[in-house]
């Protein structure tokens, strides 16, 4: 379960095979293992020891993986920082992680200015000599006694509801989460995995771990662009692609989608939100079935998964617990509720975090009796399949009744011309809150009647949207591509004062 040993294994088994492909750059397993060893020696010479923290402020590139494998061999802890954090937010997480080394790149280094003023920092620039100097040794590393339960990552939440919290994830938690993902998808050393979203986001990190665990080739991209993703799938015969539904939708809407050869994809997986049925059918028509997963940082980006062959049989379900894990729907006291009852989704298993870094209060609130309380609302059906209802913080109360925006969003999915949409609660003098639809289209018109036609007769009257906004700008999203509804609620807090209701 020690990840430094995992990379060394593949270096011995298939040393000349490509571990990471990044544009025209290729890094074999032997090269990755050797460079990680030399990086570990260089970091040790800087004073990094077992349990010390190393900050990573870096876009997608092979050096990101070199550093975290080096840390695994030292028993050090890696803290990846959100590329979208401001200097003040970075100063907070750098101080919270409490390390003295941060590895970054020239384009991002200025973001550490405030953090450097507040504490002594050794900043290593991968684009300069400071990084190559670290590699200038023979790699003769005295291995540290690293245990499976040792922390390996502090993964910070996006901080949308307060200061970011650092989920402490261990060698063991990543091992189980990666093993489960690889086994579910039948992923092995013959596969090519496309990763076009940030390694600094836990979902991206998890996908890179699957490649390391299985010996597959990781095709690493600096960013997601739907046309380029389609070309890479065709040209490099990508066999594994995992992403949030938005990215699948962007590819499906691209003019090259129909003429692109996607026949190499053997394992497609989506997480972060329920996949709309029209999108499932779009990919089914291309011969691609999709596995759906409910996951979160606190469980090493693992959790609950719906097998691909049940995607239409169990529409809307996120599936069943991962191997070696349990899940339940609980009430406010943590007691399991009957099937069909809305409650909090809780997960228990080896992939669950140790806790939040130096935050016992938050840890105690989230980890109770071995269960991770996710803060997400859901239900379980009589067959034991789980359904996500919504984030507890996104729920609105209209006239004393609970309204779940995700339920309305699912009903509105697939409207022609709609690129993305979100439902939020806005103030209402009579009912307290009422639903509003915030949409982005491809230029085609969208009116209130179209929205209501999708909902009337299916949703109760108190759930029907009352306002519609069609905006030109994309919806605000965090690094994991989830819509920042708190920002939308703030932006449209006065919507009823200057908009006509659609009903």
Image: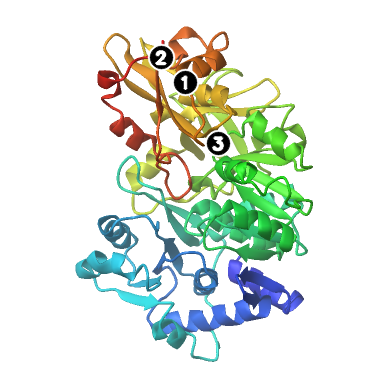
Residue 55 in the image: above or below residue 294: below
**Mark 1–mark 2 CB contact (< 8 Å):** yes
Q: Where does label 3 land, which residue?
A: 273
Q: Where does label 1 land, which residue?
A: 447
Residue 186 in the image: above or below residue 100: above
Where does the C terminus fall, quadrant-wise? top left
Asked which secondary structure carries label 1, the reply is: loop
Disc assigned to residue 281: none
Question: How far apart are the two marked residues, 3 and 1, measured between alpha carbons?
Answer: 25 Å
Q: Where does label 2 land, which residue?
A: 502
For residue 319, say whether it is visible. no
Q: Residue at x 55, y 20 (%)?
A: 337
Asked which secondary structure carries label 2, the reply is: loop
Q: Residue at x 65, y 35 (%)?
A: 279
- The quadrant in which residue 291 appears is top right
Question: Upstream in the sequence, badge 1 or badge 2?
Answer: 1
């Amino acid at each position: 379960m020690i990840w430094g040993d995992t990379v060394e294994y593949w270096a011995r088994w298939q040393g000349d095979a490509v571990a990471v492909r990044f544009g025209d750059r290729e890094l074999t397993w032997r090269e990755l293992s050797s460079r990680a060893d030399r990086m570990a020696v260089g970091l040790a010479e800087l004073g990094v020891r077992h349990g010390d923290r190393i900050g990573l402020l870096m876009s997608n590139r092979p050096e990101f993986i070199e550093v975290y494998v080096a840390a695994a061999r030292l028993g050090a802890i890696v803290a990846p920082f959100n590329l979208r954090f401001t200097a003040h937010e970075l100063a907070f997480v750098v101080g919270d992680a409490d390390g003295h080394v941060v590895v970054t790149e020239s384009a991002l280094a200025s973001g550490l200015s405030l953090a450097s003023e507040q504490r002594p920092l050794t900043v290593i620039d991968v684009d300069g000599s400071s990084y190559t100097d670290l590699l200038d040794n023979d790699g003769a590393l005295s291995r540290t006694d690293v245990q499976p339960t040792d922390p390996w990552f502090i993964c910070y939440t996006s901080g949308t509801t307060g200061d970011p919290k650092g989920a402490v994830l261990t060698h063991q938690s990543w091992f189980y989460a990666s093993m489960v993902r690889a086994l579910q998808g039948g992923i092995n050393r013959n596969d090519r995995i496309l990763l076009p979203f940030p390694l600094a986001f836990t979902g991206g990190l998890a996908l890179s771990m699957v490649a390391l665990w299985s010996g597959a080739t990781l095709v690493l991209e600096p960013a997601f662009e739907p046309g380029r993703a389609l070309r890479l799938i065709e040209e490099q015969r990508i066999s594994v692609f995992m992403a949030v539904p938005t990215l699948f939708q962007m590819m499906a809407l691209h003019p090259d989608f129909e003429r692109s050869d996607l026949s190499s994809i053997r394992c497609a997986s989506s997480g972060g939100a329920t996949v709309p049925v029209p999108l499932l059918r779009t990919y089914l028509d291309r011969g691609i079935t999709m596995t759906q997963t409910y996951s979160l940082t606190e469980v090493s980006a693992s959790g609950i998964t719906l097998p691909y062959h049940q995607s239409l049989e169990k529409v809307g379900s996120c599936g069943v617990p991962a191997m070696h894990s349990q899940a339940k729907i609980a009430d406010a006291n943590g007691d399991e509720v009957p099937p069909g009852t809305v409650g909090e989704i809780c997960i228990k298993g080896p992939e669950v975090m140790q806790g939040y870094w130096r935050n016992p209060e938050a840890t105690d609130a989230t980890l109770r009796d071995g269960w991770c309380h996710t803060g997400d609302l859901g239900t379980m059906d009589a067959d034991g399949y789980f359904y996500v209802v919504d984030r507890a913080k996104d729920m609105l109360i209209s006239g004393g009744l609970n309204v779940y925006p995700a339920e309305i969003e699912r009903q509105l999915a697939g409207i022609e011309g709609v690129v993305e949409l979100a439902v939020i609660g806005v103030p209402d003098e009579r009912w307290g809150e009422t639903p509003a639809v915030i949409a982005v289209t491809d230029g085609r018109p969208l009116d209130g009647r179209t929205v209501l036609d999708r909902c009337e007769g299916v949703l109760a009257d108190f759930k029907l949207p009352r306002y519609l906004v069609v905006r030109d700008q994309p919806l605000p999203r965090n690094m994991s591509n989830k819509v920042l509804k708190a920002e939308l609620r703030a932006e449209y807090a006065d919507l009823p004062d200057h908009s006509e209701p659609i009903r």
